Amino acid sequence: MRGIVVVVAAQFSLNGDPVEVGDHPHLLAALREELDVTSPKDGCSPSGQCGCCTVLVDGKPVISCSIGLERVEGRTVTTLEGLPADERERYASAFASTGALQCGFCTPGIVMRTKYLVDKDGPALTREKAARHLGGHLCRCTGYHPILDAVDLLASGEEVPVPWPTAVGAGGGPPSDPGPGGSPATALPATGGNGNGNGHRHGPAPTWGVGSRNAKYQAGELALGDKDYVDDMRVPGMLHAAPVLAEHARADVLTVDTAAAEAVDGVERVLTAADVPGELRIGLIHRDWPVFIPVGGRTSYTGDLVALVVARDRATARRAAELVVVEYAPHAPFADALTALDSTEPAVWQIGEPDAPNVLSRSTYARSDHPEGLDADAALAASAHTVHEVFRTQRIEHAFLEPESTLAVPVDDGTLEVFSGGQGVWDDRRQIADVLGIAEDRVLVHLVANGGAFGGKEDCANQAQTALAAWLLGRPVKCTFSREESLRVHPKRHPVRVEAWAGCDADGHVTALKARIVGDSGPYASVGMKVLERAAGHASGPYAWPVVDVDAFAVRTNNPVCGAFRGFGANQAQFATEGLLDRLADAAGVDRWEIRARNVVTPGATWGPGQVMDDGCLGARDCLDAVRPMWDEAVAAGKAVGLGLGLKNSGLGNGFKEVAKAVVRFDDDFATGGGVEVRHCWTEMGQGVHTVALQVAVQELGVEPGRVRVLVDTSRELGAGQTTGSRGTLMGAGSVAAACKAACDDGCRPGVDYEGEYRVDWTQAIGTVARPTIHSTFGYAAQLVVMDRDTGAIERVVAAHDVGRAVNPLLCEGQVIGAVHMGLGYALSEDFPTDDQARPTMTTLRQLGILRAKDVPPIDVVLVERPQPDSPYGVKGVGEIGLVPTAGAVAGALHDRDGTWRSTLPMRQDGG
């Protein structure tokens, strides 16, 4: 327990020991803020809608953010920290070996409920009952199926093998972490091995090399809640900060009165724009996002920060933040993208060009390989069959379970250490330094593995403001968003309108595609221009259209900022593409599987804006072939079926020079069994990039996995920008392999930093050459949705994904299942709308329409491995492509059931 409690609010037993706590709004706050028990995670307090904070009270599962201290008086509270060591190991082993965790933020709460269910029912616990009882838990990563696999294993009473070896310098049991900035002390599961054929001197390569199926690095720590996220970190003298957000989406700020907040006992300072010593605006591409809206400035969405209150504890900071008084002069907001596109009045304060004030970007191209040189309109007019449709997709919230959190710590030497859960620490460092008005080398940003991101943590959320507070006060400061603040501040998936025309000949061979795309990007750039660039580039789907004409706008509005989200524009565009293919198939009387097979890209074919495809594109047809038997079976059984085929680039492409580096370093006692350290530059956010680095090191060096330590190193210039674009595995594997080769070539001498690099510098931007290589690598996927004709219930999803090479099939399958779960929500139920004042109408997780465990149908994953030429191990990537085909497949199944075409997301199964 920290500090002295002056007034005792409750007494209870915690993990077998009597404790006393002071006043707190709920049990979770007492556990985390006073007792330093951090396995229960705070994902949504006090709404009780995510389940991350589940503990046992008198042996029964309780959402600890929804129970007051008076209700635990004299009772017994048990958290994961209090379980016996053998039980902790058994649960951690089960969740690790089944792939039942990715980011791990939700896992401790799920483990506690699982313990209750297993203790209560034992082998009689059915999968269906477990799914119902997990209804109070959200998992945005796994799609729930692996979690239910872990529950099945635990309920069976069977022995659960421990899936990790004893690490170098550590004891047995689940791995442990030394804390912020330190090197992980353990490696992942399994030992053993047979030769890898590389001729390296360290003996036979263990089975834990590339292509092996093993548990995630640090899975044990994650399952038990022992690995710190930023909000779990504590440092002496730490203050807490709370933001004051804009009350209007578009309003002049006339005054900001902080006097009442500053008068609150325990408040250290209230920061506003007047306190910023450097740049007021930051941004990943355009520096257009104010860290505070100043007096005399204008808000541009309800996620704008006006002030930041810093106090001795979180409760005081939040209470004082409510006392900051801001006087506004509201203006009518731009809540509709088409209205903003046509307006000559800027939606955003001090942003916009006079001739097109609300156009963030425009991506346009036209290509004709028609034998007579016809343009799109003429080729469509000459087609045997044409379709014209307007498709609309909705705004979507990432709903990562860990709200954004930053800890900033001043150092005696005049530098600042920042612990960030973002996706790009070098971007964080640059933007923080700009705001503080200091050189970048005075800021060191430590990348802390985060509790989910999916693209939503690329931008600075509260990093710059927290760093400013610590810098000005000379004290450590932590700022953790509430769930509502997170929902309001960070970027969403773009709502997109696609008006499209498509044609085919009498045999179903496509002839021409024309698309006009408008995406609502919100007020600030983020990476919105790149999302609409991807939407434009991917509008043709994985098909060889002879004639293409695409024009795409990213438009500024006063709705929430939109930016990166898994799929990155490809989802929206290919929902339209797949709908067009289905309609053309219907018009031409061609089977929906067959029309895709006739038009799929092949080596030498010209794709989209003009890229000539290589042998890697054979994966698209491979995926179609993989689902064909299940397609035929479902059709023969009279089921309603839908099919989606998609592609998604891996990497940034479009002429961007991408460089990733890694470092391998051998311990002094390596020759006698010591360890090897692998340092890389990628964010671990559940996708398993640490595991990839470990497996490549095992493969190339021939060492046992227990001797490998993996960490992100931000003290060296290894930077590869953002962990985005499905490129962590691709470029991470390439750079670690190169570092290992350098080490082997030099005899693996201890104490030497062996650096390796992987570079992609051969892409070209759209329009720069006649046949641009826009992207270095593509992943492909076909998804089949089988639906009951009577009820409309989805009975099964078959997901065939070409990943090039599955570095770890267990983790690959987990990525696909989780993505399909997300894709089903995107297709059917999820939304994040705004009203006519550009205010989000949803403020809690439950309102978002995310599917829970009982709602997810069986998902069969088929991993296809068609190697990408010249890619490390043939890798293509899997994170981004996962839900690109899903919505189109669901729409096809719904049409097959009732004959109604769907063109708007989300689609309700009742046809609404």
Image (cartoon, helix red, strand yellow):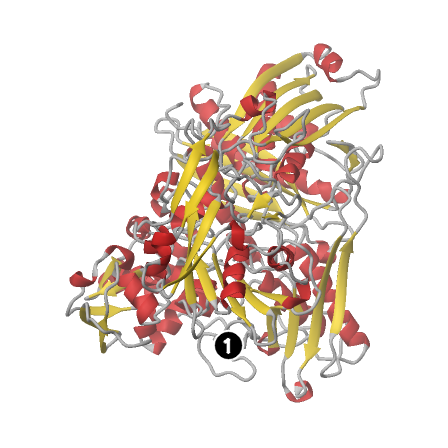
Residue 478 sits above or below residue 491 on the image: below
Q: Nearer the viewer, residue 429 or 12?
A: 429
Query: In what quadrant of the picture does the N terminus appear?
Result: bottom left
Q: Is residue 104 above or below residue 184?
A: above
Asked if residue 603 can be seen in this view, the reply is yes
The percent coordinates of residue 887 (x first, y second) are: 51, 33
Q: Amino acid at mark 1?
A: Pro
Whether residue 157 is visible here, answered yes or no, is: no
Is 361 in front, or is 539? 361
Query: Is 77 left, or right, of 232 in this rendering?
Result: left
What residue is shown with label 1?
Answer: 178
Q: Say which quadrant the C terminus sits in.
A: top left
For image coordinates 20% across by 63% down, the residue present is 69
Measuring from the top left, give residue 98's x and y in whole percent: 46, 60
Residue 459 horizontal side relative to residue 475, left or right: right
Q: Position of residue 526 (x, y in %)?
A: 60, 43
Name the foreground residue: 540 vs 581.
Answer: 540
Residue furthest left in the image: 74
Check disc 1 and report its element: helix, strand or loop: loop
**In which quadrant of the rendered view does residue 320 lie?**
bottom left
Give the number of marks: 1
* 897, above or below 732, in the image: above
Q: Residue at x 64, y 48 (%)?
A: 284
Side (left or right) of 793 relative to 723: left
Image x and y of residue 119, in percent: 25, 65
Number of residues whose C-alpha sits closer than 10 Å to that of mark 1, classed few (under 14), some (14–19) or many (20 or more): few
